[in-house]
Image (cartoon, rainbow, N blue to C red):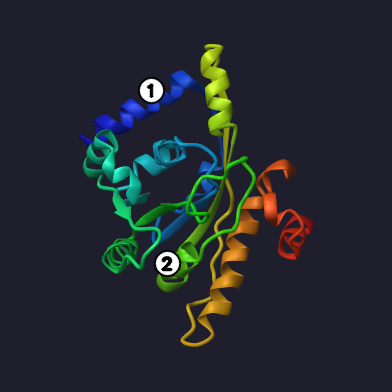
Amino acid sequence: MRKIIILFLRIFFGIITKREIVGMENIPDDGPVVATANHIGIFDGIMIPSVPKLARHPNLIVVVAEKYARKPVFKWAVKHLNFMFIDRFNPDVPTLKKVIRNLLNDGLLVIAPEGTRSPNAALIEGKSGAAYLAAKTNASIIPVAITGSQDGELGKRLKRLQRMDVKIIIGEPYHLPSLPKGNRDEFLQTATDEIMCQIAALLPESYRGIYADHPRLKEILAA
């Protein structure tokens, strides 16, 4: 059923989008891996896992906001894709433990550090969950930048019977330092800024949002 759903998604996105994928060779063959992406449209969460090399991964992990558990179609799809619902507003320890176990079993986690869709396609403040999971498991991190899939663009294009021009750029992998025993709040803030600036560096300037003037982004772009 998982293969059937993914095949359907690839056909579906082939119909509604002209999708360009750059950098698939940057996806590591061994885990653990955390793919961190910006979040600008309702379809991002299922569009990224439909990227061929991600879809074929034997231990693909995707966490989905708990609000979608109330929607029968989403609930059915999440169950058969073997994804997980997560409570974004309260400590969801059982789900986090399951994600960590799967990551340590050569898993590949797809996650949006912002935790929700941007209202205007520009980056909003990242949350620390992705940084915590990557540092806890010593995972490789790959930044993923999406453009063209924002909800407003989707509505306009569908009304005109036009496909969306979507581009997905996958950057080179990098690592965070190991999770320290002390000063975790400071560590996670710095690590989250690193994750968000790595994504921002792959995006056009208009998509960089609150990270547009971040000193770390300027360092990455200069390098």
Q: Residue at x 56, y 19 (%)?
A: 157
Q: Is residue 30 left or right of residue 198?
A: left
As drawn, which residue projects farthest toward the bottom? 182
Q: In the image shown, does 41 or 167 lie closer to the viewer?
A: 41
Q: Please state if 178 lies on the left or on the right of 32 as rendered.
A: right
Q: CA distance from mark 2 to mark 1?
A: 32 Å
Which amino acid type is marked by label 2?
Leu
SS state under label 2: helix
Instruction: Please state, as top left, top right, bottom left or bottom right, where the N terminus lies in the image.
Output: top left
State which quadrant residue 78 falls in.
top left
Residue 191 location, quadrant: bottom right
Task: From the top left corner, tell me how far across and down residue 99 is, in percent.
Answer: 32, 62
Would you name the residue on which mark 1 appears? 11
Give the residue pinned by disc 2: 133
The answer to whether residue 78 is above or below residue 196 is: above
Total tally of numbered discs in the picture? 2
- Residue 169 image position (x, y, % from top left): 58, 41
In the rendered view, tell whether residue 93 sits above or below residue 83.
Answer: below
Q: Circle 1: is it few (<14), some (14-19), or many (20+) Cα within 10 Å?
A: few
